[in-house]
Image (tube, rainbow, N blue to C red):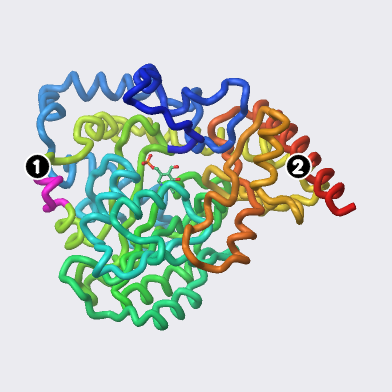
Amino acid sequence: MLGPRQFVNPFVSSHLHAMATLFDNRCESVIDLSIGAPSRDMMPISMMAAACHTALSCEDAWHSFQYGPESGDHAFREELAVLLSTQILNLDSDQHTPVQSHTLACTSGASQSLANLLSLLTHPIYTTHVFLQSPTYHLVFQMIKDRGFDQKQLIAVPEDADGIKIEWLQKQLDELQIGESSRHPRFYNAVLYTVPTYSNPSSTILSPERRLQLVELARRHNLLVICDDVYDMLYYDTTIRPPPSLISYDLNDIQSRPGRGNVISNGTFSKILAPGTRCGWIQARPELINLITESGVYVSGGSPAHFVSKMIHEALKNGSLSKHIKDSRSVLHDRLVNGLSKPIDNLLLPLGCSYCKPRGGYFVWLKLPKSISSIRLQNTIEKHKINVSCGYGYKFAVPSEGDIESKLDIGRHIRLCFAYYNTSDLNTAVGYLHQAIQLCIDEADEECN
Ligand SMILES: Cc1ncc(COP(=O)(O)O)c(C=O)c1O
């Protein structure tokens, strides 16, 4: 997914065939903070070897090799429901009911699932607009384009420290006259793509009040809200757990307000186990789950990640995955604090950078000093061959006609991932960034004089 990739023509080069991972074609000496994946030492190899051994030694091991049920293996979904209830919902204090397995279906990861949801539930004619949290996870733009949406249909929804601005969205939906009655029995009138918890790239969290408002708004406008809930379990402050995922709000009143609902939670094992598993899940109202799992692709292929979900099921059942998630939180928290925050506070804040310390997830969203854009920083890094790279802010701006001011502001940020490198490498990277930002400041000063 994530790092910068050079285009290699597969017809004239065997290079792609020799790659062992998606990141192999990057330069070894460059510390690339744009990579949003767990590091090699975080991969729980022996844990999964044990889980696979158990799963494949049991009497009905052959089940794992057969087509799986459309919505996913029952035992897997039962254990997944327990994981989600304990890791995401705070059952002592939350008003939300525990996750139930019939609200879940297995997927082959968040990316493939998002493309599938867009294909099944949206249509560039009936679904007139695609709203996107802004800044947004940049790799969804291509998927939206692949579905046939035009750039003119994209609308960036601004956010503040409490997540996307609901009043702003409300105004847009009213102005565009996106009404409650659906134009098509299957396709929603509009779609919103969002990462409500520890957003990629800005790490913001949508407040509980806004979650409630968003669900109500979605219902009034036949809006489908697709939430990439991929970082929810990675919270670093155990005293402030993130609010329950948006889907819990849509499920709460299912008895009094039946129907297929307006929210889908799109989850993945990529960040809490390993991206190579290509396994994830969706959570939605049962009516919507049925609609999705009765679609052609599920009926033809069965559960999209059946074999691997059976292996993960063992790791869920014996508790090792929960422990691994807890251990990952502690590794990531250490990398955030000692790898990035401390050197940023010491070296980059004095240069005029600023940021909000994330409370979870993978990223620091750093604002560059005034007058420095991420494009300028990128050019400087490349010109002076400084051994660092990062997520340059302009890439996360929604490619719509929208507000130039906000695009400029997004372009003055960089996204720094603290999951892929150890503390020492992260320290070194911040040193390189210091050097590059200082060069940009000097250049900008010279231009003014
Ligand atoms: C918000 C978001 N959605 C989806 C993905 C990709 O998830 P998956 O590996 O399950 O396809 C990522 C990975 O960076 C992400 O940050």
Is 163 magenta? The answer is no
Q: Quadrant of residue 97?
A: bottom left
Q: Magenta part of the protein: which range?
A: 293-299
Nearer mark to the viewer, of 1 and 2: 2
Percent of width and height locating residue 322: 40, 37
Q: Quadrant of residue 411?
A: bottom right
Q: Is residue 319 left or right of residue 133?
A: left
Which residue does the image show at 23% across and 80% down from the upper left? 181
373 or 32: nearer the viewer: 373
Which residue position is annotated with label 2? Answer: 437
311 or 26: nearer the viewer: 26
Which residue does the image show at 14% across and 24% down from the upper left? 61
Percent of width and height locating residue 134: 51, 60
Checking the image for residue 300, the label placed there is 1
- Between the residue at mark 1 and the residue at mark 2, the CA separation in whole angstroms equals 53 Å
Q: Is residue 287 left or right of residue 265?
A: left
Amino acid under disc 2:
Ile
Residue 347 seen in render: no
> Looking at mark 2, is its residue's CB closer than 8 Å to ligand 1?
no
Amino acid under disc 1:
Ser
* Mark 2, secondary structure of its residue: helix
Which residue does the image show at 90% across and 52% down from the upper left? 449
Number of residues whose C-alpha sits closer than 10 Å to that of mark 2, classed few (under 14), some (14–19) or many (20 or more): many
Rendered view: 382 above or below 136: above
Percent of width and height locating residue 273: 40, 33
Residue 156 seen in render: yes
Q: Is residue 72 left or right of residue 83?
A: left
Which residue does the image show at 69% across and 35% down from the upper left? 381
Number of residues whose C-alpha sits closer than 10 Å to that of mark 1, classed few (under 14), some (14–19) or many (20 or more): few
- Mark before the other along the chain sequence, 1 or 2: 1
Magenta stretch secondary structure, dominant: helix
